[in-house]
Image: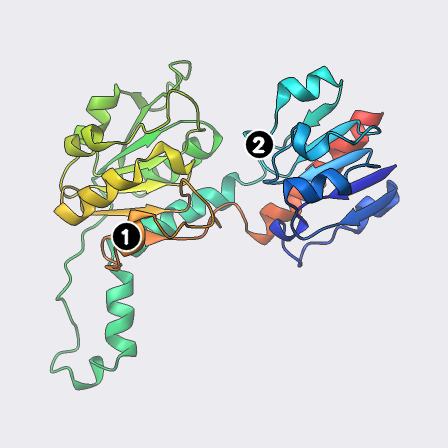
Amino acid sequence: MKIVFLDVNTIGDDIDLSAFDKLGEVVKYDHSTAEEALKRTKEADVVITNKVKINAASIGDADNLKLVCVTATGTDNLDKAYLESRHIGWRNVAGYSTNSVAQHTFTLLFYLLTKARYYDDYVKDEHYLSSKSFTHLDEKFTELNGKTWGIIGLGAIGRKVADIAKAFGCRVVYYSTSGANNNPDYEQVDFKTLLTNSDIISIHAPLTDATLNLIDKEALTKMKSSAILLNVGRGPIINEQDLANALNAGEIAAAGLDVLTIEPMHIDNPLRLIKDSRKLYITPHTAWASVESRTRLIELVRNNIVAYFE
């Protein structure tokens, strides 16, 4: 069996991949364009990818290909109709990053809620050395306890965040983007109610026709001016120009994002121009990527390969 990793760099060089060596010949590439993938997959039995698009342009010459494994939950990069037409199987992974993404959700929140960057800079810029008081309170911050936390997408990650938010004393409400989710532990509300009542809104939904541009100008104007918006779902769920306008106009207090419409960040992204860390905090799609999460991910991918061929 020949196994080809098309973008192994997305996993990180600290994760042990030696378990795949027991399955056959393993070839790893840090990154691959579609043109490079077309050549590199030609003799592959299994292709492993994170972000490389899998379609006729990238695997059209892979006559031996039997399975495509995605090192992620989302499968937006797979042309499933093409794979089916060629009787090529595909597998993704789920549940590996729940703890990591939930943890990162609160990292985004507390950075913004507690004005962490401002106070860190205050000390490191040595203003505290000349302070006449033992404390410094120029940037006001509030407690999480007693606030309403609105969750968009109450899947495994959304439920984990809900449980933690509840432990902090939040009232948790949620909106089901598919309409199929019904969780008796938390109050389900319509989209407008979630927008108007929530102090914090976190997005944990997949990208679908129903969620594309879900948070646009109309939605943002319904939110509280004191609200904090968090997105650890998919970038295109938020209209980035509308968000930039809302942040600049003070229509919402702040936004914390781990995902963007185009990744890496494009030079034309309007959020690039917002430098005030009290209003905007962006991390480079790292919420999923704790060491433990990536280790689980690789174990699941290997198990998918073994199970498929058994």
Mark 2 to mark 1: distance in Å? 28 Å
Residue drawn at the location 27% of the way across and 59% of the way down: 277
The amino acid at mark 1 is Leu
Q: Is residue 215 above or below residue 51?
A: above
- Quarter of the image where one finds residue 139: bottom left
- Quarter of the image where one finds residue 35: top right
| Circle 2: element type | loop
**In this view, which residue lies farthest toward the bottom?**
130
Instruction: Point out residue 274 in the picture as x, y percentages from the top left corner.
Output: 25, 55
Image depth: mark 2 or mark 1 in front: 2
The circle drawn on residue 280 is 1
The amino acid at mark 2 is Asn
The circle drawn on residue 77 is 2
At label 1, counting other C-alpha atoms closer than 10 Å, the crowd grade (few under 14, some 14-19, many 20 or more) is: many
Mark 2 in CB contact with mark 1 (< 8 angstroms): no
Q: Is residue 261 left or right of residue 92?
A: left
At label 2, counting other C-alpha atoms closer than 10 Å, the crowd grade (few under 14, some 14-19, many 20 or more) is: some
Instruction: Point out residue 299 in the picture as x, y percentages from the top left corner.
Output: 71, 41
Q: In the image shown, does 63 or 105 lie closer to the viewer?
A: 63
